[in-house]
Image (cartoon, rainbow, N blue to C red):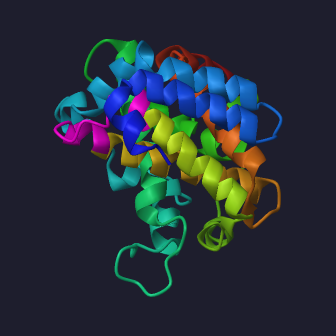
Amino acid sequence: MVSQRDMFNLSGDEIAEKEIVKMVDVFDVEGLEDMAEGLRGLGSGVHKTFYEAYLLGRNLFEDGAELSVDEKRDDDLLTLAYQNLSSKHFFSLKKDLITFTHFSEIFEFIFPIYYVYLGRKLGHNDVKRIYDTKIYERLIFFLDNFDTNSPEVMTPTAEYFQKLKKVQWADKETQKLFKLTDEIRLYGTGGRHASNLKLIDFQVRESMFLLSLAGCNAINNKRDKITLEDIVKTHKTYFKLLKTNLPALVDNLSDIQ
């Protein structure tokens, strides 16, 4: 927790750096140093450009870009998630850690990154190519190896999402690390300013995206608990995703299918 003194006396970048140093000192997990370096780089560069693209919302797309029902697979990932994950979060007595709202951010994050590297609005063909190359499935099953040339991708099932629905924290230490990374992103990108509500909202959704990937990594490793290793893995995946030319990756994956 950031002290009141630091909030008044230090800049956002200085607070973020202080929290990163504390994170490295307190937690002991492989890959933490690399995660710290990745967090240091989120205040500028491609992350800033991605955030600006994310704010465009539906303006990322040309008219008619959305896929029709007939163009979607029977094992459509988002449909399975909707059918098996809870949509309730704020008012249910028993709150699932990962809800459909969380998981859907995986889809919401792909399009702005694609847009950044494409340099124009996405048309129907762009959306269909993203869907057909199973970028979303690659993210949840392969995580930081989402760009592997293997044409074989696991088929999502209802059982997978039923397991994801039951995922919880392994311990308070893991939950503490995740909350600390939330704070670091908040202060490191200027979100502590109450007037910047759009940025704060984005960072809430960014947290949902990361938590969903952490839960998927746990399930992929036959666990029902999110560990420190999952937190590191999901950040590694995110940092790599931001730096990946997704249109070029989709081209490559289309060629090997």
Q: Quadrant of residue 60?
A: top left
Where residue 28 appears, as percent x and y from the top left, is 81, 40
State the extent of the magenta-drawn residues as a range: 186-200
Q: Where in the figure is residue 118, as x and y percent of width and height?
A: 37, 14
Judge whether 198 appears above or below 148 on screen: below
At 35% across and 74% down in the image, what residue appears? 90
Of all residues shown, which one is farthest toward the bottom?
93
Q: Disc count in the image? A: 0
Q: In which quarter of the image is the C terminus?
A: top right
Residue 180 is left or right of residue 208, and the answer is right
On the question of residue 124 being in view, the answer is no
| 40 over 25 or under it: above or below | above
Q: Residue at x 51, y 64 (%)?
A: 81
Comparing 182 with 25, the one in front is: 25
Position in image of residue 71 (x %, y %): 41, 47
Residue visible at 32% across and 35% down in the picture: 191
Q: Is residue 192 magenta?
A: yes
Confirm whether residue 57 shows in the render: yes
Whether 134 is among the magenta residues is no
The structure residue drawn at horizontal position 66% and vertical position 68%, both measured from the top left corner, is 167
- Camera-nearest residue between 18 and 192: 18
Q: Position of residue 164 (x, y in %)?
A: 63, 66
Q: In this view, does 107 lie to the left or right of 132?
A: left
Q: Is residue 9 above or below residue 252?
A: below
Of 20 and 33, nearer the camera is 20
